[in-house]
Every structure is written in structure tokens, then in C-alpha cells.
Amino acid sequence: MKAFRGGARILGAAGLALSSWAGVAATAPSPFEADTVRHALIVVDALVQRKSLLATQESPVVAGTLRVKTPGVRKPHDHSTKAFGEVLVFAVEPGRYRPGSVTTRMPKMQVGTGTMDLVIPLPSDSMRALDHVVAAGSVVYVGRIGIMTLPRAFRQNDYRFTLNRDDDRERKVWERLLDLGKPGAWESLIQRRLDAITVEADSIAAADTLQGPLGAPADSAR
């Protein structure tokens, strides 16, 4: 678990209307419209929680960025997108990438005064598992990034980050994306990934059966 302080930006209602997210949402095509021959899909799944004195509340992710880490790229720019369902979906050219930030919508500190959009920068160097090298035609699930927001009055927030890879969660994400959008040529590639998850799960189950309880062979004699 990694602690990370500061760096967040707050977008108020007026600022949001003029923010880059508004422009992206108005003009950006669906990631599923990207050519499978020249692009890859990267899915970023984030769970943002806000800790208060009495409870822990979840805040929806509404947007995010993906950072280009491909060696040799001059003046790389971040890819920006709005949430597609519960996740962020990026269509990118082959290369190395890493989630850069997520934007979450949460209630303001003063109860009853509305909501604000908070841009949370993700760790840039630690958590190396966030880095992914993708080839054209690949579909990549980064994993579920857990973000615990620890508000502090008149000071920058504290954040704690975790990364979890879970086949069941990945399956739900891909199936949900197929249900939500028109995946076009990406449908067969996503289905291939779903089939691979099933094969992996079956292999693990078979190995557990052969191993038997407490590590003893299934057919061992007493």
C-alpha cells in the first residue's frame, strides 16, 4: 500500500464547464471506433473511496488520463477520456502506457453545498505493475486501482493506493463493456480475452482438485 500526498485539483461547477473534459466529451469518438489493426484498448478500473469520521463512502470516477511512457516519443501528451460505464477505456497506438490520473465526483466538505470534481494524480514511479506495453489488436485490463482519499481541512489530501488483479472482476468489466456499447471489431478480441480468463480459471480449479485438501494428493491413501 502506497501513501501519496497532494497534487489534486478541484474543478468547481463553473470550472468544469470550461475544463478540457467538456471538450473531450463533446468531440471524442467512442474508443471502439478505433482500428483494431493499429490500436489497442486499455481499460483502467478505479475505485475511489472517501474516509470520514463515521463511514467510508464511494465516489464515482467520471474521467481520467493515460500517460504515454513509450521510449523515444518526443513531447508525449496524455490521453484523456470520460468514464465509459464504471471504467476508463482508451484506444491507443502500440507502446508503453501508464494511468496518469482519475477524476472523481464527491460532495463538498460543507454538507448540502453540492459536489465537486477532484482530479487525483496517480503514482508516477511506484507501483510498476501499472505500466503496460501493448501491441495492436490487444485488449488490456490494468487491474482495479483502489484509491482511499483522506480529506484534511485546509491542507492537501492524503491518498493511499492499491492495485488488485482479479479474474472475476476483469470478466465483469469486459462483459459490462460489451453490454453497454457497440464494440464493433473489438467484440471478437474482447470475447477472446474472456475465453482466456475461463481457461485460466479452469486450469487453476483442475490443479486445486488434483492437489487435494491441505496440499495432499487427491488420491493419497491414509
Image (cartoon, helix red, strand yellow):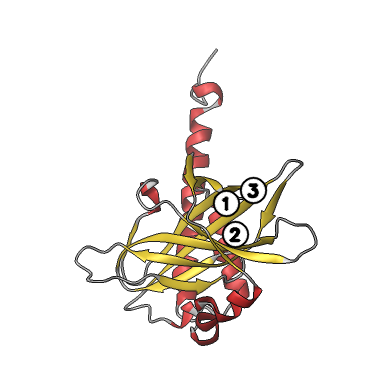
Name the mark nearer the viewer: 2 or 3.
3
Amino acid type at image mark 2 = Lys
Q: Badge 2 local density, few (<14 within 10 Å), some, or many (20+)?
A: few
In the foreground, 49 or 9: 9
* Disc 3 element: loop
Question: Residue 76 in the image: x percent, y percent?
Answer: 29, 70
> Can you name the residue that lies furthest to the left here?
72
Q: Position of residue 18 (x, y in %)?
A: 56, 81
The CA span between labels 3 and 1 is: 38 Å
Q: Percent from the top left, x then y, of residue 218?
A: 52, 26
Foreground of the two, 60 or 132: 60
Tell me the number on the disc at residue 153.
3
> For the residue labelled by badge 2, is the local secondary structure a helix, a strand or a loop?
helix
Asked if 197 appears above or below 114 in the picture, the reply is: above
Give the position of the C terminus as an image quadrant: top right
Which residue is under mark 1? 168
- Which residue bears the numbered disc 2? 172
Asked which secondary structure carries label 1, the reply is helix
Outermost residue, bottom direction?
A: 27
Gap between marks 2 and 3 measured at Cα: 37 Å
Residue at 50% across / 20% down in the picture?
220
Q: On screen, 212 above or below 186?
A: above
Q: What type is the residue that disc 1 sits on?
A: Asp
> Which disc number belongs to residue 6?
none
Residue at 45% x, 67% y is 65
**Among the two numbered marks 3 and 1 on one chain, the one whose residue lies closer to the N terminus:** 3
Q: Earlier in the sequence, mark 2 or mark 3?
A: 3
- Whether the residues at callouts 2 and 1 have beta carbons within 8 Å, the answer is yes
**The disc labelled 3 sits on which kind of residue?**
Ala
| CA separation in Å, label 2 and label 1 | 6 Å
